[in-house]
Image (spheres, rainbow, N blue to C red):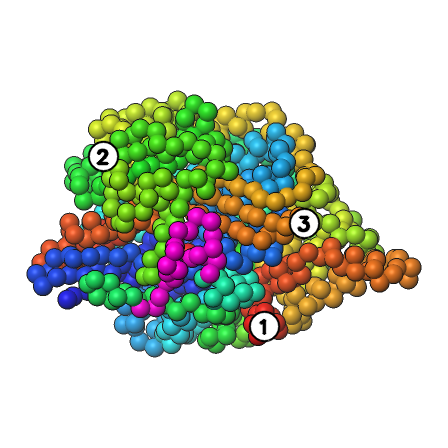
Amino acid sequence: MRKVTIDPVTRLEGHGKIEIFLDEEGEVERAYFQVPDLRGFEKFCEGRPAEEMPRITQRICGGCSTAHHMASTRALDDLFKVEPASAAKKIRELMHNAFIAEHHILHFFFLGGPDFIVGPGKPAGERNFMGVITKAGKEVGGKVIEVRKRLRGVIEAIGGKSIHPVCGLPGGMSKPVTEEERKSFIRAAEYLVEFSVFVALELWDNIVLKNKEYLDLITGDVYKHRTYYMGLVDENNKVNFYDGHIRVVDPDGKEFARFKAQEYLDHIREHVEPWTYVRFSYLKNVGWKGFIDGEESGVFRVGPLARLNAADGMATPLAQEYYEKMYGVLGGKPAHNTLAFHWARLIELLYTSERMLELVGDPELTSPEVINIPTEIPAQGMGVVEAPGGTLFHHYETDKKGILTGANLIAPMQNNSASICMSIEKAAKSLIHKGKGTDSTLNMIEMAVRAYDPCNA
Amino acid sequence: MTKPKVAFYWCASCGGCEEAVINLDEDLLKVMDAVDIILWPAFFDFKSKDIEALEDGDIAVSFINGAVRMGEQEEMAKLLRQKSQIIVAFGSCAHMGGIPGLGNLYTRDTIFQRVYTEVQTVENPEGITPQERTAVDIGELTLPEFYDTVKTLDQVIPVDYYLPGCPPPADLIMNAVNAILEGELPEKGAVLAPDKPLCDTCPRAEERREGVSIQEIKRPHEIKLSPWKCFLEQGIICLGSVTRSGCGERCIKANMPCRGCMGPAKGTVDQGAKALSIIASILGLEEEEGMTEKDVNKLLDGIVDPAGTFYRFSLPGSLLARRRTE
């Protein structure tokens, strides 16, 4: 029995290892994706004051600290039974969209995208953001830097820091937005719209879609699983990152469930394996059937393509156009192509830019009234937002003083962990034959992880 | 001339330190021109075996972030120490334990119990927990040990410099990188940030009254926070008086109190103990004489989570290190 190890999985937020077992002929028998890391937030949040949760739980993932901050803040609204000030909701959604955009750009140009922009078979030393600049040009590189700077500017103006912002409180925000800030946000949003269409999506078109080899990889069977899909949707069932209902569609695209954050326990369960530190989410009402896809298996996916699959469309016009184009190429909804997560990510990027433009145009954004002080006695609260990698749940239980007695945190990495295991195994079985696993083959197995943008910390 | 080899590695961390480096923007590209990255799992495709293949001392500098929670993290820290001329503990977690260090208020068993059995969504009737060795039908899978106690980086390897913050601010990162590239480093063991406490650079310092006193402790969500008044004067616990400056007062500017991520200011041994003594010394100062023991206790009760507040980022590196388990 031979074993091939990929350690660590790279261009991934957090820690991961892949073990591939080969039979006598050198064909893949089994492959495992392991997460060798645990910190234990669900325990050490106990005893901490609830209002500190947005500043503690965000340290689960520095790459999506704003998402944890938002999910946590929303859980505090629920916990303290306080309706956030109207302006605060808009400021939060603006900040959250700026963050999603910033992170999606990070993923496409620094983490998962280099596999396409540079090429999956290029030497290991070139498959990175430096290689992206070489391939796409310094002008593109400069724009990537500029747009991320402006988006971080939005987050920093609202939340102090772009990594680990501090502004979320039950009932609102720690401070209002000034008119001067709003004007700079408008400029950032306008820049982002241009960037999304003329840099990101155009690059995807030119480098990926026009390359038959890439297109075959995206539409082919190596990276494909028929699963359930989950995502947050607004009242019209359009993709939303900050607010709405959680919607689940089955592998045929039919609505399977639609529920509020407070009802998550009726829908989600998690499975434990002894060979990894991460838990595996599944749909309670389908059940855990192991690492298999299809209607019979409770495995579901979250993240960009899952959100688009779970929704009926995009709430903004340009993003809707690109959404229709994507499903046209992929052959309708839902699309099961794991590598199309990258494509969906760029369509979402465009959506966030349009959504930001809508929000910055709202005069209420600069209202001085940004907080409603809670008056109720806390007991428990749930909050859900879409993180870049998928649906994110925070659930706190407290005593009457608001001190945590229990926390449950379900991050996108848990929701996608079963799919990731299935995806790397399928890729390994399809790509490794007669014991041959070149650097580029192994990288193409890692690509099955990167598509999800998990944060395995 | 060959470029100096540089490694970035993460232990028990969130990835925010990695992103803080990416966010150096144009400066990052300049650094990339000047150095040869040989390990940076978040952004480059080099593997652990590439480091094992190096000669001792081959790496000019390794920046290691994250606390030491898992056996593998200690092994990797030791490997990088062996291969590197300089080790920089990068960020609050490597420096003092950081947020993951709050795990030291509990034990390995209670953490496993919560994470793999108790939480409402877990369906685990057999009580399965992750194991260091698992026999699967086809062979064996291994996992690193989950330690009972979180350690700081300098509790497992000698550390040359510390770059504090959660995450470290861009200007301090660049100062450190430039100092290393130019060979103009301070004495070993130095914290590469200003010495003064945050209160000295706080934008609210000018408005602060002499002899601050707290009549009643408030929590940040209980009052409308003033955008200019000293947090302590508002009854809100703020660690600015015991915390190193250099962060750019980013939290204060967002109208939220300091939680101490930059670590103790120079001369302070134990950030949490010092904070506790300062807060205690200003509690109800003006009316202390007329106060009964009951009044004092009530005031102290306002501090709802002393360990998690005063040692938010520094528990493993503090004199306490962890909650006693016997």
From the viewer's side, name the closer residue of A9 and B150.
B150
Q: Which mark is residue A401?
A: 3
Q: Is residue B88 visible?
A: no
| Left or right: residue B267 compared with residue A342 | right
Q: Is residue B253 above or below residue B212?
A: above
- At x 39%, y 51%, the residue is B123
| Residue corresponding to mark 1 | B324
- At x 44%, y 39%, the residue is A266
| Left or right: residue B94 compared with residue B256 | left
Farthest residue, direction right: B290
The amino acid pointed to by label 3 is Lys
Q: Do the residues at discs 1 and 2 belong to one chain? A: no
Asked if labels 2 and 1 touch by Cβ distance under 8 angstroms, the answer is no
Q: CA distance from mark 1 to mark 3?
A: 25 Å
Secondary structure type for disc 3: loop
From the viewer's side, name the closer residue of A254 and A77.
A254
What chain does mark 2 sit on? A
Q: Do the residues at discs 1 and 3 belong to one chain? A: no
Discs 3/2, front? 3
The amino acid pointed to by label 2 is Leu
| Left or right: residue A228 compared with residue A406 | left
Q: Which residues are magenta?
A: B113-133
The amino acid pointed to by label 1 is Arg
Residue A238 position by quadrant: top left
Q: Is residue B114 magenta?
A: yes
Q: Position of residue A139 (x, y in %)?
A: 36, 40
Q: Which mark is residue A209?
A: 2
- Quarter in which the N terminus of chain A is drawn: bottom left
